[in-house]
Amino acid sequence: MPELPEVETIKNDLRPLLAGRVITDVKVAWEGCVDRPLASEFGDQIVGRRMEGVERRGKLLVFTLSGGKTLLVHLRMTGSLLVAEPTAPWGSHTRLSFRLDNGKELRFVNVRKFGRVYLVDDPQEVVGDLGPEPLNEEFGVDDFRALFDNRRGMIKPLLLNQRFLAGLGNIYVDEAMFQARLHPRRKAHTLSPEELAGLYDAIRDVLRQAIADKGTSRSDYVRPDGAEGGHQEHLLVFGRVGKPCPRCGATIERLVVGGRGTYICPRCQE
């Protein structure tokens, strides 16, 4: 699933390509990808609107449109947004396409059909329940520590909870917990203030490095031009079962924590 760094990369790539562009036509190939409004009303409500901004909230892309509407796209597990020429072959997994006034198309490719698009007046009805942004400049270590007040569950499922902290997924939680030397099964209430500060720094460091590398391409994630990200070359534990820990040399193991495949160093993360 595209996580915060991948969605941030897509946002950054799309901004110069979509700025000021007008949507002139829409093709809905699979109505199930349109969450709201009704798929039969989607085209009438969005055609003719200008792209005024592209932002990210958690794992969602947020497109501000003229006339007070907002388009949100949640890529979920296998979704991608591609900018293509209209003559480019229409892939079998393309579920939705926006024709733009410069002749190009913005195509929503969604292999496993989990991704969704939302056209709303108020984006808060879609993103209002999300937790804070971990890279927000105003989100400090004390704010992070406060999130753990009265929390007693395992750390990894907590960090994956989008209502707790927005944007993290399996890859970057594993990488951050390795960097912070924390076992993913540790209970939240057992972390000291110093350990929480270390986890806060690790999360931010891991996310920033992944953004600099344009995301992690391990399965379906590609950028809008079809290029892959580069952070898969720099993962320290995720997906490296059986390989030596880059820090201590112990063999990296795979566990299941909260129903999710999880990679750890058994020595560094005791």
Image (cartoon, rainbow, N blue to C red):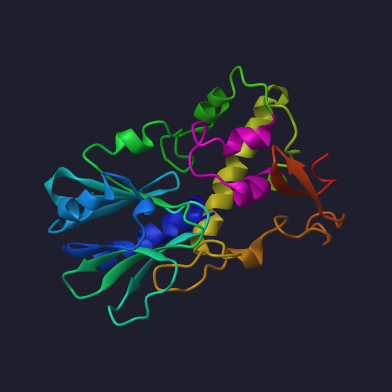
Residue 121 x, y percent position in the rendering: 21, 39
Asked whether, in this view, residue 133 is left or right of residue 154, the answer is left
Residue 81 appears in the rendering: yes
Q: In the image, what residue occupies the spot 36% across and 60% down?
A: 12
Q: Quadrant of residue 209?
A: bottom right
Residue 82 x, y percent position in the rendering: 38, 68
Residue 21 appears in the rendering: no
Identify the magenta region.
154-177
Asked whether, in this view, residue 147 is left or right of residue 254, the answer is left
Vertical side of 84 occupied by 81: above or below = above
Count of labels in the image: 0
For the C terminus, the image quarter is top right
Residue 42 x, y percent position in the rendering: 23, 51
Look at the image and say whether residue 269 sits in the magenta stretch.
no
Q: In the image, what residue occupies the spot 53% across and 54% down?
A: 77
For the N terminus, the image quarter is bottom right
